Image (tube, rainbow, N blue to C red):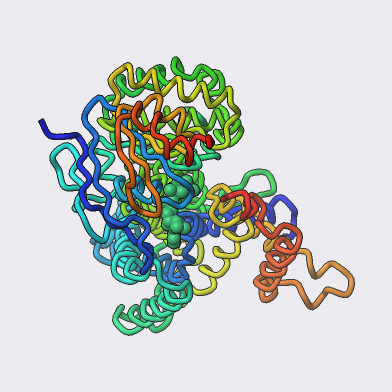
Amino acid sequence: MHELPQQLVNGLLLGSMYGLIAIGYTMVYGIVQLINFAHGEIFMVGGFGALTVWLWLPGGTTMWVAIPLMIIGAVIVSTTVAVGAERFAYRPLRGAPRLAPLITAIGLSLALQQAVWAWYPNAKSSRTFPEIPGDSIHIGSVTIQPGDLFLVVAAPICMFALGWFVMKTRVGRGMQATAQDPDTAKLMGVNTDRVIVVAFALGAAFAGIAAVAYGFRYGEVNFRMGFLWGLKAFTAAVLGGIGNIYGAMIGGLVLGIAEAMATAYMNDIPGMDKLGGQSWADVWAFVLLIVVLLVRPQGLLGERVADRA
Amino acid sequence: MTALLEVEDLRVAYGKIEAVKGISFTVEAGQVVTLIGTNGAGKTTTLRTLSGLLKPVGGSIKFNGKTLRKYRADQIVSLGLAHSPEGRHIFPRMTIENNLRLGAYLRTDKTGIEKDIQRAYDLFPILGERRKQAAGTLSGGEQQMLAMGRALMSQPKLLMLDEPSMGLSPIMMQKIMATIAELKAGGTTILLVEQNAQAALSLADHGHVMEVGKIVLSGTGGDLLHDESVRKAYLGED
Ligand SMILES: Nc1ncnc2c1ncn2[C@@H]1O[C@H](COP(=O)(O)OP(=O)(O)OP(=O)(O)O)[C@@H](O)[C@H]1O
Ligand SMILES: [Mg+2]
């Protein structure tokens, strides 16, 4: 049960979900220095978007057809909510004191949770998510559940696609420029308002895909899932160095592995026997964050703030 | 014939404080016009307003027949106005080549862009030698070359340079000024802001002296170079 390779894989799976969500925090922060605390809920509504598509599909639709449509559903719902939030909640507050958008984000979070709770049919408790059929896959001593296969395929594709977009495309370069020096980016002809929208939309799309992965992994979605997952992903973003997209990915993986290890092995350390297991996993995640921030305040891949000037 | 750039009674304020207090000047196509003046005279404020980063509180700016007030900064670039800002502001974590590509952000002619990148390397060979390095590794003078090269990548009708010689060694400064002369000879229209009045006025067709938000003296480059008050105030003679 507690074999190391299996725990590493568990950590990587968990971590790649954190990483996918963390990208949304880090891209938006990198460009507008805003912590979009509603991002967890943008992840959550994506899960319900995917579920809705599944419920619309005629019974007996194969998963090969359903999965792409569910991804599209999740991405559409997540990006629509995120772009709407940017346009109508955050943009009017640009230039306002930092506290104003922060409070707006928290309000938006609560509103989205309550909206799903109140209006989505039967969403007062968890709603069952469809299963990916098939048997678990065994590679050596490692077992991968069919529900995790989606993540195994989707996470690396998303990461590579994002890296390519940011480094190789024109809009990606405009994004980097806006993050480094917004006024000068404007002097290059970059429409920075549009870049901000793209950052929100891309981050939301990845959160939507992560929500589909969540659904397949845990077999359910619920209106509360955005809170803890958003907080963990935010932790991953800070851990990796907020503003740095590779940092978000690395931070997610480190957090996921640390959590898996703590869950599996903490019990074995003498005197720590009560501090292992799933119930303590979240605590260890935040302990890790605090330790890293004490040693490296800018995060694993972040630059010192002074270097950004 | 109307001028390429017509600035009339331009006023710009930071909050309640007016930094530019009603200035008027023109730039004709093919000319080099320079704004000189002491620290805090409002030169940078003027350029940042022309490129749309600041909004004026009064007056008008006409560029190539269009009133600029209605355009965002990124749209103004597409009208043909390029601005190499004070302090260079290259993108330090991007490669030299990607900095140049950003200068061509609004262009879609791929082969033309490659040709112009090559032209920037011909103009400043050091940039070509280090094309794949992060721009932040360049020296101050080299960063200035990159900033100028980058501004040229948009194929501007008017190139605005804000203190290109700032903080450079005399040799590097000569090199930058020689490049500006070369661009002028090639027909590029330039609005040059400089503290180095001697160098700027020797190049310029027209010059304007700014003091605390106003133009206090205008003339041809040669006239100003020989004007007694200019020589006293800016060329360190008594
Ligand atoms: N962001 C700002 N907020 C408030 N005041 C400003 C700001 N930027 C400039 N000023 C003020 O506006 C006036 C004009 O400044 P500006 O930078 O345009 O001068 P300059 O002629 O470019 O000077 P220098 O030769 O030192 O670059 C100065 O009094 C300056 O203090
Ligand atoms: Mg200045």
Q: Nearer the viewer, residue A222 or A22?
A: A22
Q: Horizontal placement of B120 versus B76: left or right?
A: right
In the foreground, A12 or A101: A101
Q: Which residue is drawn at the image coordinates 45% and 73% (left, top)? A: A97
- In this rendering, the count of numbered labels is 0
On the image, the x and y values in percent for residue B201 come to 40, 29
Residue B233 in view in this figure: yes
Which quadrant does ligand 1 occupy? bottom left
Above-or-below relation of A297 to A189: below
Q: Decide if residue B84 is in sight here.
A: no
Q: Position of residue A268 (x, y in %)?
A: 84, 67
Residue located farthest toward the left when viewing the structure as drawn: B1
- Judging depth in this view, the residue of A61 and B166 nearest the camera is B166
Q: Is residue A267 left or right of residue B55?
A: right
Residue B16: quarter of image: bottom left
Q: Residue at x 74, y 55 (%)?
A: A3
The relative height of residue A149 versus residue A171 in the rendered view (above or below) is below
Q: Quadrant of the N terminus of chain A?
A: bottom right
Residue A228 appears at what percent x and percent y? 54, 73
Q: Looking at this view, is B115 or A221 the one in front?
A: B115
Q: Quadrant of residue B151?
A: top left
Q: Is residue A173 above or below residue B14?
A: above
**Percent coordinates x, y for residue A126 in the rendering:** 43, 77
User: Which residue appears at 69% of the width and 60% of the height?
Assistant: A297
